[in-house]
Amino acid sequence: MNFDFSKEQQSFKEDVRAFLTRRVPPERQEVFGVEYDGQYQFGREVASELAQRRWLAVGWPEEHGGGGKGPIEQAIFNEQMGYGMVPRTGITGLGFVGPALMVFGSLEQQAQYLPPIAASEVEYCQGFSEPNVGSDLASLELRADRDGDEYVLNGSKMFTSYVYNADYMYLLARTDPQAPKHRGISMFIADMKTPGISLRALPYISGAMAAQTFFDNVRLPATALIGEENRGWYHAMTTLDFERSGLERYGRTRRAFDDFVEFCKTTGLNGRVISDSPTVKHKLAEIKAAFDVWSLLCWNVAWLQSSGAVPNAEASVAFLHGTEQRLKFAQSAMEILGPHGTLRGDSQWAPLRGTIEGIHRESMHLHGAGTSEIHRNIIAQRGLGLPR
Ligand SMILES: Cc1cc2nc3c(=O)[nH]c(=O)nc-3n(C[C@H](O)[C@H](O)[C@H](O)COP(=O)(O)OP(=O)(O)OC[C@H]3O[C@@H](n4cnc5c(N)ncnc54)[C@H](O)[C@@H]3O)c2cc1C
């Protein structure tokens, strides 16, 4: 394993960092736990400028609107987007709808859907979870019944993040209720403007607004089916691993940590600088060690991708470690800050614009993209070959 960048990759990293430092100054950077429309719109503006440079999907082939480079360049870019605290947009499309289409989509679907994702012209949400279905995703109940040239969808999806900005939903539905549960599921892309789709707002503790999404006799054209009918489960499992590489998430959390260290070095509390305390020093040292490991685990996933492998247990190792260390960091930082740490970003007394309070709220989400237990199951079964 050699993590040195080539000269071109190093200069790409510096170019991206320089652009983001100029284009996203501190007052426009995202703060953990705070989401509002103006911030999202600014994120879209930045994303479309990045797309014009062919950086947004730098790892995608040029014919799909990408930069024609590989997973390492994409990972460099993603880490810089995170570290630059660029307001998050387009994650679902870039992170795994695009990769799924490149593997399973028809040529027509690739031509239709990929360039707008790479250009940041569209937003996607993900419709996997349902009111009765989370970890046991293969038990999903949303029905998609074939009717001539259309599929008719009935049921609902739960925890649909980003849905209020979404143009499309990337979803799984049951197309064969008689088949064993994994073999009766298909993957679709639904235009959110299709009649019969409605939303019930669902606020997250992180400050984001998601929804339960209802489908009431929603008619999708048969061309909305991605890949083979009843193979959706297998398509989805392959592409979920794309979401789990996690360098963007690492970069964003690392930035919060680096800022926090600086804050501890320069801020006085009870008559002395915070970082003078041996307890604080040890806590920060522990977090640094854990985050350095997290970085290596993420880069291992990127490196595997660049060698043509589809990381699986490795992606779960990186994700699990990152999720748990992010929570530990947030808890330690809250302890160090004491009561001030609980202030939200709208208070003038909130340290670091409330970012620690925000990351603490956000890191309590241990369910997004698979719970810690599910990642442990994957590591045990696929990484260690243990029985189910
Ligand atoms: C912030 C956030 C954003 C999300 N965004 C989306 C989204 O955009 N689209 C979407 O489709 N979904 C989304 N989800 C839903 C997410 O995918 C589910 O929360 C997740 O799959 C877990 O399902 P559940 O919450 O129903 O928990 P459950 O599956 O009911 O699990 C409950 C508990 O039981 C444990 N458990 C379950 N099964 C096992 C097992 N086999 N072995 C050991 N322990 C087990 C779990 O680890 C958990 O602790 C989001 C969730 C969060 C928190």
Image (cartoon, grey):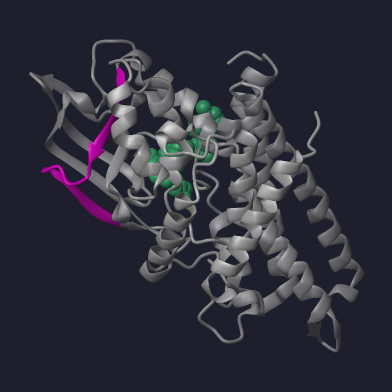
The image shows residue 259 at horizontal and vertical percentages of 71, 68
Q: Residue furthest top?
A: 179
Is residue 135 visible in the rendered image? The answer is no
Residue 188 in view? yes
- Quarter of the image with the N terminus in it: top right
x, y percentage for residue 261? 78, 68
Q: Is residue 321 above or below residue 361?
A: above
Picture quadrant where residue 65 is located:
top left
Q: Which residue is depicted at the point 85% across and 81% down?
A: 273
* Magenta stretch, main secondary structure class: strand
Q: Which x, y percent locates residue 369? A: 50, 39
Q: Residue furthest bottom?
A: 271
Foreground pick, 7 / 255: 7
Number of marks in the rendered image: 0
At x 35%, y 23%, the residue is 105
Position in image of residue 43 (x %, y %): 45, 61
Tell me if residue 337 comes above or below residue 127 in the rendering.
below
Q: Residue at x 55, y 36 (%)?
A: 59
The answer to which image quadrant residue 8 occupies is top right
Q: Is residue 96 left or right of residue 377?
A: left
Q: Nearer the viewer, residue 326 or 164?
A: 164
Q: Is residue 116 above or below residue 221?
A: below
Picture residue at 38% right of the left edge, 64% below the top: 41
The quarter of the picture where residue 320 lies is top right
Viewer-proximal residue among 71 and 235: 71
Where the C terminus falls, by quadrant?
top right
Q: Is residue 194 magenta?
A: yes
Image-based side of 54 in relation to 388, left or right: left
Q: Residues in magenta?
A: 185-201
Answer whether residue 288 is magenta in the image.
no
